[in-house]
Image (spheres, rainbow, N blue to C red):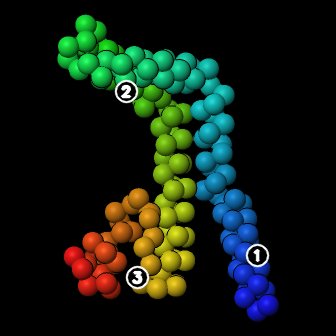
Amino acid sequence: MLATSERVELLDYAEQLAKMVLESDIVENYRICLYKMQSSPETQQKIQRFAKLKDLYEEVQRFGKYHPDYKNVMTQIRQYKREMDLDANVAEFKLAENDLQSLLDEISLHVGRSVSEHIKVPTGNPFFDKGHSSGCGGGGSCGCS
């Protein structure tokens, strides 16, 4: 019974943490940037144009430089991607997305480290992953390398 009540208490804390994240300025900025990106016809046109060409790009990649449209598609995909990435709404959204991911990575790291220094926490951010390899292949507590 104790294990069940502890589990419920932990889940309650997790819900409180999730609520705090959802109410944060970082998430609010993320939502605003997402809305701007999704509601801008110019931005959506750039995204859709890039997405359509991406299908053709994947076909060209299968054949490589032997595909008749290889050079044209490769040039266009770079041009469309650059136009999309330089769009103010897309750029703002990517920054907001990175800020949110950094917050989530930091939370994961704190939770994992509070349990044990040997807990692997996949952050996807090399800044947080430094020097804490453990387990098989990481040369950590199991002794292998």
Disc 2 packing (10 Å; few <14; some 14–19; many ≥20): few
- Give the quarter of the figure containing the C terminus: bottom left
Q: Is residue 70 above or below residue 100?
A: above
Spot occupied by residue 51 in the image (x, y as percentages of width and height)? 48, 23
The residue under the point 79% across, 90% down is 1
Q: Is residue 54 above or below residue 38?
A: above
Disc 1 packing (10 Å; few <14; some 14–19; many ≥20): few
Chain-order first, disc 1 or disc 3: 1
The residue under the point 66% across, 63% down is 21
Q: How many marks?
A: 3
Between label 1 and label 3, give the one nearer the viewer.
Answer: 3
Q: Look at the numbered disc 2 and give the secondary structure of its residue.
A: helix
Q: Distance between the residues labelled 1 and 3?
A: 25 Å
Chain-order first, disc 1 or disc 2: 1
Spot occupied by residue 86 in the image (x, y as percentages of width and height)? 42, 30
Left or right: where does residue 130 sit relative to residue 12? Answer: left
Q: Residue 118 carries which label?
A: 3
The residue under the point 51% across, 34% down is 90
Between label 3 and label 2, give the one nearer the viewer.
Answer: 3
Amino acid identity at mark 1: Asp
**From where the camera sits, is residue 83 visible?**
no
Q: Which mark is residue 12?
A: 1
